[in-house]
Image (cartoon, rainbow, N blue to C red):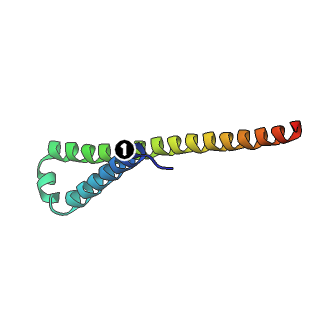
Amino acid sequence: MLTSVDARRRWFGTFFLIVAGGMLLWGFTFLASFLVKRPMVFVIYWIACLGFTLLSFLIAVYDMRVIRKRVREEKRAAFNKAFSDIVDEEKK
């Protein structure tokens, strides 16, 4: 089950990915001539775009780890419950 923390984490990942995609689109179309004329702005702009991309990637990897851990704990809890039910039946 997803919680509000999961939703917020995914929203931030999506937000960073949309910003990076928007920067990519604008950098190759509308801002291309402006960025080519100013090398320092060009480098800073593309480093910022890379930063947003990496942030979205890191959030996705973190989200994957959290979900895997939660699934592993749920499997363990279900196994323990099923095993305890079997043990209880054997005791009767």
Q: How many marks?
A: 1
The percent position of residue 3, horizontal first and vertical second, equals: 44, 46
Image quarter where the C terminus lies is top right
Quarter of the image where one finds residue 78: top right
As helix, strand or loop, the secondary structure at mark 1 comes to helix
Left or right: 39 in relation to 66: left
Type of residue at label 1?
Answer: Leu
- Give 64 or 2, whichever is nearer the viewer: 2
Q: Please state the horizontal and vertical placement of residue 81, each as a whole percent of the image.
A: 71, 41
Q: Position of residue 89 (x, y in %)?
A: 84, 42
- Residue lying furthest front in this view? 92
Question: In the image, 9: left or right of 86?
Answer: left
Identity of the residue drawn at 78% across and 42% down: 85
Q: Nearer the viewer, residue 28 or 37?
A: 28
Horizontal and vertical percent position of residue 2: 47, 49
Does residue 65 appear left or right of residue 91 in this picture? left
Neighbour tally class for label 1: few under 14, some 14-19, many 20 plus, Cα within 10 Å: some
**Camera-side residue: 44 or 61?**
61
Looking at this view, name the residue that lies furthest to the bottom: 29
Q: Between residues 8 and 52, which one lies in front from this camera angle? A: 8
**Is 52 placed left or right of 33 in the picture?**
right
Q: Disc 1 designates what residue?
A: 54
Q: Residue at x 23, y 54 (%)?
A: 23
Residue drawn at 25 percent across, 57 percent down: 22
